[in-house]
Image (cartoon, rainbow, N blue to C red):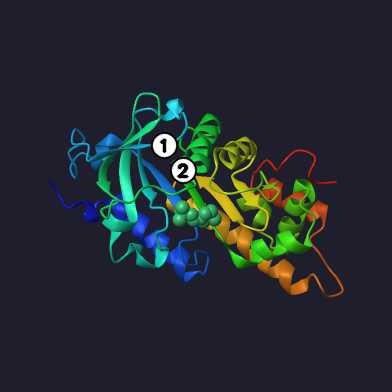
């Protein structure tokens, strides 16, 4: 068997998580990432018939039965993932009804997957129904997005429009906009189901006073989504207290959508 730390998906996961930490999005154990991998991507690296441990998921993820996921561990620091990937992440297969994670690699100190597994797996299910190529769900705590949820309306159309107005490329990067959940207790099946419901119509879901979820086809795309929304929030937080002299008008946003051939969220522009 080849060394799993050399597998392209593993290298990309470690680089992305390290980059998230370096962006200041993941203090302490803040944030979690799940990457769906195909059996043929891991076959050379691990014996998929050798289950190390069985860990209950705490809910029914039957839509994802038999799928493989690389997921960050609960309580683990993104800062440390690059130095000890096997302690800070785990790779498992979901059993037939999705109620058990069959651990194949990782969580080497006896740990387990993130406390936000419900939000991750339920979001994977929701996004796969919209885009068969969805592979990634990413959660983190970027400071400006979080700050914005204290001072801006949480109404989704208003929140999205403000972000679109902050940088020219926002409407091109996330034409589906940003959905928003009010403050809720994290780490529960309830917030998982609420997040997945919001994921049906957008790839970005803000958790007010907590952080953001992004979903996408690969780690780069998902990172870029959050990076773009966070940049827009940063601009907003720099200017919100100053007199506004200019903005990107709705007619400009429409021109952008047309030029880049993206379908923006219905009813979000005047
Ligand atoms: P975990 O350490 O369980 O992944 O939780 C971190 C977090 O961001 C909770 O929302
Ligand atoms: Zn969090």
Is there a contact, CB below 8 Å, between mark 2 and mark 1? yes
Question: Percent from the top left, x then y, of residue 104?
Answer: 25, 41
Q: Is residue 142 left or right of residue 239?
A: left
Q: Quadrant of the N terminus?
A: top left
Q: Is residue 169 left or right of residue 110?
A: right
Near-viewer residue (221 or 37) = 37
* Residue at 65 percent of width and 48 percent of height: 184
* Residue at 69 percent of width and 65 percent of height: 147
Q: Which residue is mark 1?
A: 57
Near-viewer residue (227 or 27) = 27
Question: Percent from the top left, x then y, of residue 238?
Answer: 73, 74
Position above or below: 37 against 106: above
Question: Percent from the top left, x then y, of residue 261?
Answer: 64, 44
Task: Tell how many labels.
Answer: 2
Q: Is residue 243 left or right of residue 53?
A: right
Mark 2 vs 1, N-terminal side:
1
* Residue at 56 percent of width and 54 percent of height: 225
Ligand 2 - quadrant of the structure image: bottom right
Near-viewer residue (123 or 101) = 101
Question: Percent from the top left, x then y, of residue 62?
Answer: 43, 25
Q: What kind of element bears circle 1? A: loop
Q: Which residue is mark 2?
A: 117
* Residue at 65 percent of width and 44 percent of height: 262
Q: What kind of element bears circle 2? A: helix
Q: Residue furthest left?
A: 1
Dot label at residue 72:
none
Task: Mark 2 vs mark 1: give the one in front.
Answer: 1
Near-viewer residue (80 or 4) = 80
Compute the Cα span from label 2 to label 1. Answer: 8 Å
């Amino acid at each position: 068997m080849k060394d799993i730390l050399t597998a392209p998906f593993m290298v990309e996961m470690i680089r992305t998580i390290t980059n998230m930490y370096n962006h200041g999005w993941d203090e302490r154990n803040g944030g979690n990432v799940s990457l769906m991998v195909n059996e043929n991507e891991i076959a050379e690296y691990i014996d998929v018939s050798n289950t190390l441990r069985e860990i209950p998921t705490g809910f029914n993820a039957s839509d994802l039965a038999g799928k493989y996921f690389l997921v960050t561990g609960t309580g683990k620091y993104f800062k440390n993932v690059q130095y000890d990937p096997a302690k800070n992440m785990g790779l498992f297969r979901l059993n037939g009804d999705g109620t058990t994670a069959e651990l194949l690699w990782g969580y080497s100190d006896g740990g387990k997957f993130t406390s936000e597994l419900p939000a991750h797996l339920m979001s994977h299910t929701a996004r796969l129904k919209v885009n068969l190529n969805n592979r990634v769900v990413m959660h983190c705590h970027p400071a400006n997005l979080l700050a914005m949820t204290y001072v801006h309306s949480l109404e989704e159309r208003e929140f999205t429009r403000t972000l679109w107005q902050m940088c020219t490329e926002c409407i091109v990067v996330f034409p589906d906009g940003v959905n928003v959940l009010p403050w809720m207790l994290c780490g529960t099946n309830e917030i998982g189901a609420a997040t997945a419901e919001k994921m049906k119509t957008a790839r970005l879901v803000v958790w007010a006073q907590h952080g953001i979820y992004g979903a996408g086809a690969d780690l780069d795309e998902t990172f870029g989504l959050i990076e773009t929304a966070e940049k827009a929030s940063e601009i907003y937080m720099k200017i919100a207290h100053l007199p506004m002299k200019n903005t990107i008008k709705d007619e400009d946003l429409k021109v952008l959508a047309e030029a880049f051939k993206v379908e923006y969220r219905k009813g979000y522009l005047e």
